[in-house]
Image (tube, rainbow, N blue to C red):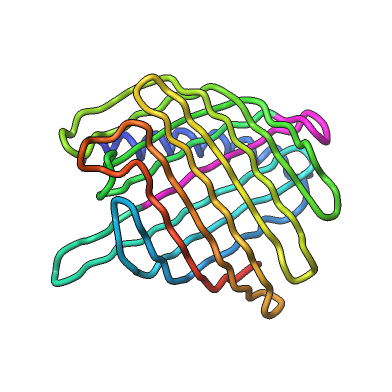
Amino acid sequence: MARWKSGALALLVLSVFPLAALAQSEMVDSPRWGGTMDFGYLETSGNTVGQTLTFSFDFGKDGLIWRHSLHMDAYNQSSDEKRKAEKYLGYWQSNHKLDDRHSVFYRAQYEEDKFSNYAAQGSLSLGYSLRALNNEVTILDLEVGPGYRRSKLADTGDFDNEIIIRLAANFKWTISPSAAFGQTLSVEEGNENTVSRSNSSLTMAVFKSIAVKLAYNIRWNRVVSPDTNHWDRETTISVVYQW
């Protein structure tokens, strides 16, 4: 596990630092960084069943040349001194804009889930992104590109290393000045496994910087061990601080 964590840390550091250096060259790219912090109640089903508290953090910027986004979330649950759930997810993505609709992206992602078929998965991907819709109400981004994924099997501790193809869609709908809907879909296809994700959310503003969010997340692994579920589902109700 220590060897895997060292490798995952190196993966993220090597991914983020070149992007930070690039960010120094976009001082004129203007719009300020902003983000959200979510604290909420989480109910899980699939390989982990139960209720617990969850935390997530998003930080990003959409400038004239670059669009950056950082996401982190985590939860764990214990009962009678026994750990019942533990999960950590983080990713960084940067898009270099070619014009108003087209960009190329670079993405680094790492996830640990102690109670799934894969104890940990890390991936790097790059590719092409199209902003198919962009108006005052809706935004739709479509992405495709190759990548590399390294996965640690929970039951044996062995590693799978494979080339993947990543497909993704990100939809945002501003329903009203105080309400917004978001939907992301992604598929990472490899020879050893396919990982699909769906994230749906409805956010409603309460005050200027405070909102309430209802979210439903699904993850599906094509290849699992006999005693492991293909599906993991998460339902969250959270308070969001925005800046």
The residue furthest right is 136
Quarter assignment of residue 204: bottom right
- At 65% from the left edge and 41% from the top edge, which residue is drawn? 24
Task: Characterize the magenta stretch by its predominant secondary structure.
Answer: strand
The residue furthest bottom is 207
> How many marks overall?
0
Q: Position of residue 90 (x, y in %)?
A: 45, 47
Is residue 93 highlighted in magenta?
yes
Q: Quadrant of the N terminus?
A: top left
| Image height of 189 relative to 90, above or below | above
- At 54% from the left edge and 35% from the top edge, which residue is drawn? 107
Of 198 and 107, which appears nearest the observer? 198
144 sits to left or right of 25: left
- At 77% from the left edge and 63% from the top edge, which residue is drawn? 175
186 sits to left or right of 220: right
Is residue 99 highlighted in magenta?
yes
Of 214 and 166, which appears nearest the observer? 214
Q: Position of residue 36 (x, y in %)?
A: 59, 63
Q: Quadrant of the C terminus?
A: bottom right
109 sits to left or right of 204: left
223 sits to left or right of 24: left
| Image height of 87 relative to 13, above or below | below
Of 146 and 196, which appears nearest the observer? 196
Q: Position of residue 120 (x, y in %)?
A: 31, 40
Quarter assignment of residue 59: bottom right
- At 49% from the left edge and 43% from the top edge, which residue is drawn? 197
**Part of the protein shown in magenta:** 88-103
Q: Position of residue 68 (x, y in %)?
A: 64, 44
